[in-house]
Amino acid sequence: MKIKLHHTPYVSRKITRDLISCELVETRQEKNAICAQIEKLLDEDIENELDLDEKVNVMLDKEEDDIEYYHANYRELFWMVKRRVASENNVILNNEDRISDISHKILDYLWEEDFIHYVCSDNQIKNIISNSIEEFTAGFEEADTIVYEKLRNYKRKIIPGTEEYDLLYERLYEEELMKRGLA
């Protein structure tokens, strides 16, 4: 999934806002509680993929000598191995399938734990969640590009990786997301 851990608070707020504003959904918990649970589920999904990435790196590190000897492309090998072991680690690599899967997990959790109630088909609510994620990913990529461009063209040179850069990035990023209705 294109979403990173630092995006999950924004995505969870968008999903929560879209569910609450939907006439088909009756909320039975506070907005913040719903948002926190959605964020937790998104974090778990992303962390699962990060764990897979670490496992693949360990596997490839064991074969480092052969990789160097054959002048193999590490990045291509990484993706080949990741695709091979993804299903063993319950990671879905296809973006559409992954969004659908996490949308189902969110819907199931919210329903089973009595956070929301609805009288329509599960698919209608799952689609609201999926659309929220897809809208966010489209908007955050655009916002991210604009923020990097603003920082690059800043009057005084700001060094990437510094605390000042990170704080400024977060502030500008939040502003861009608000302009797009994603924050």
Image (spheres, rainbow, N blue to C red):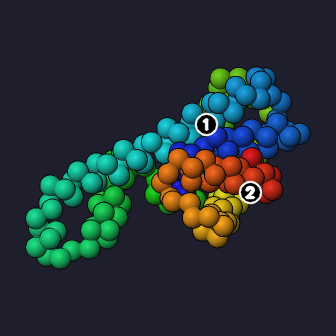
Q: Is residue 17 above or below residue 171?
A: above
Residue 156 sits in quarter: bottom right
The residue identified by callout 1 is 39
Q: Is residue 53 left or right of residue 21?
A: left
The residue identified by callout 2 is 176
* Residue found at the very far front of the displayed protein: 156
Q: Give the percent coordinates (x, y) of residue 100.
A: 60, 51
Mark 2 Cα within 10 Å, few/some/many (few <14, many 20+)?
many
Q: Is residue 15 left or right of residue 5?
A: right
**What residue do we see at 74% from left, 57% from top?**
176
Dot 1 amino acid type: Glu
**What residue do we see at 62% from left, 54% from top?**
169
Q: Nearer the viewer, mark 1 or mark 2?
A: 2
Q: Give the percent coordinates (x, y) of residue 130.
A: 68, 51
Gap in angstroms between the C-alphas marked 1 and 2: 21 Å
Dot 2 amino acid type: Glu
**What residue do we see at 76% from left, 23% from top?**
29
User: Of helix, strand and loop, which one carries label 2?
Assistant: helix
Q: Is residue 67 left or right of residue 172?
A: left
Q: Is residue 75 above or below residue 174?
A: below
Q: Give the percent coordinates (x, y) of residue 123.
A: 71, 46
Residue 170 in sight in this render: yes
Q: Nearer the viewer, residue 108 or 16?
A: 16
Q: Give the percent coordinates (x, y) of residue 129.
A: 70, 46
Q: Is residue 182 above or below residue 149?
A: above
